[in-house]
Image (spheres, rainbow, N blue to C red):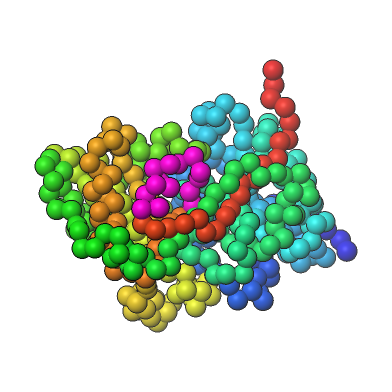
Amino acid sequence: MEYSVKTVCDRRTLNEFLEVPWRVYRNDPAWVAPLSSEIRRVLDVRRNPYFIDASLKLFMCYRDKTPAARTAVIVNGRHNAKVGSKTAFFGFFESADDMIAVRSLFDTATEYCRKEGVEILEGPFNPNHYSELGLKTNDFGRIPSFFQSYNPEYYPRLLETVGFHKTAALFTSKNNNVREFLQHRYGNQVESLHVGPYSIRSLDLRNVKHELEKMRCVFNDAFASNWHFLPVSRAEYEFSSKFLRLVTDPELIVIVEHQGETVGVLMFVLDINPLLQRLRGKVGPIKYLRFLHQKKNIRKLIVFAVGIKRSYQRTRVFSLLLSEAVRIAAKYECLETTWMKEDNPLAIKAAERLGMRPDRQFGIYEKRLMKSAE
């Protein structure tokens, strides 16, 4: 067999890049095909404001001229300035169970990285810290929930064989019987919408951009010291929130204000993956209307993000958000989180209070390419 690696440079090679997961998962009933139009939008460096401060290179490995493996390589200058070393992220990694293809792919990718002075190649990030990330390391063969990465069982082995090792462990938590649990533990106790100087409300759809800006400011402040976090610009946040109304509802986003200042945000999303799976990567007018109708029947809720400004993290805001989480989650059958790290005790504590226990596990992998200059 003949193997070759090329960079994506035109519409044809981009289409082949997007085609790889269809080859990998064609016999996998648990795979949820992403919307191809959305992947194109995210990877368009002219449209995605994340790439104002980052570069993107897409690599394809062919086996006998047939697409066999792919990855993206991203270099973010702001991240490197923060951590003090030159790191590149890899993402959108997909491959057949073919060691030669993966070795060829990453040999070319690492050669490119070395020419750019990169010391560490780390991932997967698709394409950054606030997107789908990590390699699934357990519970294979079950349909992923919304915003969870998914991959075959052999992916960790492929990466480890070409020199990567796991450096960070992520996990999600889950409660399959959340309504029953919350009713038993909390009964019907609900906080008032006005508690002293604090007030609680839902997202106001009449001024979405203004609301998104308030949420962005809270999250940027709350997550400032978190692993791999970089402040998200207004343009980035609006770009990533384009389909907000399709994955959540206004009453699933809780805003806590203190004397008019937004100080805490709780954001739930619906697990739309079973509906996305039926779309098979494409959406048209009829599919879209069917999606909106079926979305009303979703009974699994996901804690997407919780943020409290640092100066308010030891105040009443936590208990107010927890009370709202109890009130909202009690209307659903299943509650799940997006990824968490073990060094985030506040998030773990909140998940435990909602009866959630660790469920799926994910890993971040890295490969050191060269020593730092002394």
Q: Please identify the quarter of the rendering in which residue 196 is found.
A: top left
Q: How many marks?
A: 0
**Is residue 24 toward the left or the right of residue 266 in the image?**
right
Q: Please identify the quarter of the rendering in which residue 223 is found.
A: top left
Most foreground residue, 112 or 201 = 201
Please give the name of the residue rendered at 34% of the width and 77% of the height, measured from the top-left corner: 297
Please give the name of the residue rendered at 55% of the width and 58% of the height, measured from the top-left corner: 360
Q: Main secondary structure of the magenta part?
A: helix
Where's residue 117, x and y in %?
68, 31
Above/below status of 142 relative to 5: below
Residue 333 seen in the current view: yes
Q: Residue furthest top?
A: 374
Most foreground residue, 149 or 335 = 335
58 part of magenta stretch: no
**Is residue 159 toward the left or the right of residue 340 in the image?**
right
Residue 253 seen in the current view: no
Quarter of the image for the C terminus: give it: top right
Quarter of the image for the N terminus: give it: bottom right
Please give the name of the residue rendered at 55% of the width and 29% of the height, measured from the top-left corner: 83
Magenta residues, start to end? 339-353
Most foreground residue, 323 or 227 = 323
Where's residue 52, x and y in %?
48, 41
Where's residue 177, x and y in %?
39, 68
Please give the name of the residue rendered at 18% of the width and 53% of the height, measured from the top-left corner: 191
Where's residue 290, x and y in %?
38, 80
**Is residue 24 toward the left or the right of residue 349 in the image?**
right
Most foreground residue, 352 or 215 = 352
Q: Residue furthest front?
A: 184
Q: Residue furthest right?
A: 1
